[in-house]
Image (cartoon, rainbow, N blue to C red):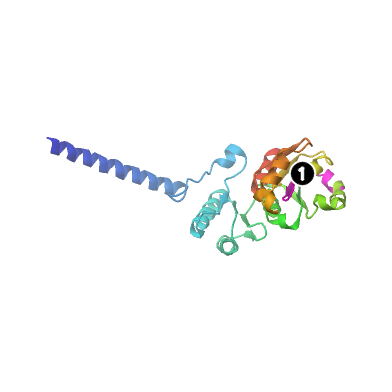
Amino acid sequence: MNSNSNSNSNSNSNSNSNSNSNSEHAMADADGPIWARVDLDREQRTGLPEAIFAQGKSDQQVLELAALLTAKQGRALATRVGATLGKKLETTIKDSAYYEAARTWASGHLPTAEARVAVLSAGTSDLPVAEEARVCAEFFGLTTTTHYDVGVAGLDRLLNQVDSLSSSDAVIAVAGMDGALPTVVAGLVSAPVIAVPTSVGYGASFEGLAPLLTMLSGCAPGVGVVNIDNGFGAAALAAKMLR
């Protein structure tokens, strides 16, 4: 009696296991590889499509995800992409581009919005993060202008850009070191400022923590702060505000 019961139990267990396995593979076939749950409805829910954070993923995983998103959505975006992988993506997926300075790859873009975003960097060392913000903002359909190396150590460089900045709908200000740039910009223009601290700086900058705290503690109103080195997050916030 126990033997038959165990046998039936094992049979049911095997049946459930096979059912679960088939269900998982069905999910994988419909929405992507079994190791990722691709969120194809995100753009409909939130206004912005799912992007690929390439860091920590294998080249093959990124290639599969990029191909799937492009096929299903007509566009795809990947950040933190190394040069070798970027060239593979550019070669494999038609009409796509790899932006080496931004460490970002893109295929297609959202419909263009009537909104202009200025992207500033305090120093040349902040360029990778600023370029990530620029490329992602353009993927999200925003028009960008760039003003690089305009940090407060040479304030005249920033003041010379005020007329151009004043015509922008939002400003993304990227800075390491002391992180003072966004507060100064917010005191000069009426547009909202999105502050991006970077991990650039000497020891006491604590890999971006010092500029992050400066930006959070700034006295000028109208500044929103994203995480350290998060150019993508700044672009996404600008798109949410302006689209």
Q: Secondary structure at mark 1?
A: helix
Task: Residue at 32% x, 42% y: name it.
Answer: 19
Q: Is residue 121 magenta?
A: no
Q: Amino acid at mark 1?
A: Pro
- Magenta extent: 163-182
Q: Nearer the viewer, residue 105 or 225?
A: 225
Location of mark 1 (residue): 182
Residue furthest left in the image: 1
Residue 48 on image: x %, y %: 62, 43
Q: How many marks?
A: 1
Viewer can see residue 242: no
Give the quarter of the image for residue 8. top left
Q: Residues within 10 Å of mark 1 (few under 14, many from 20)?
A: many
Residue nearest the observer in this picture, 159 or 52: 159
Q: Residue 186 appears at what percent x and percent y?
A: 80, 40
Q: Is 180 colored magenta in this rendering? A: yes
In the rendered image, the quadrant that contains the C terminus is top right
Who's the residue at 86% across and 47% down the image? 162
User: Compared with residue 158, is residue 88 higher up or lower down, i.e. above or below?
Assistant: below
Query: In the shown orientation, is residue 221 left or right of residue 2?
Result: right
Give the image location of residue 241, x and y in percent: 70, 38
Q: Which residue is drawn at the image coordinates 50% and 57% (left, top)?
A: 58
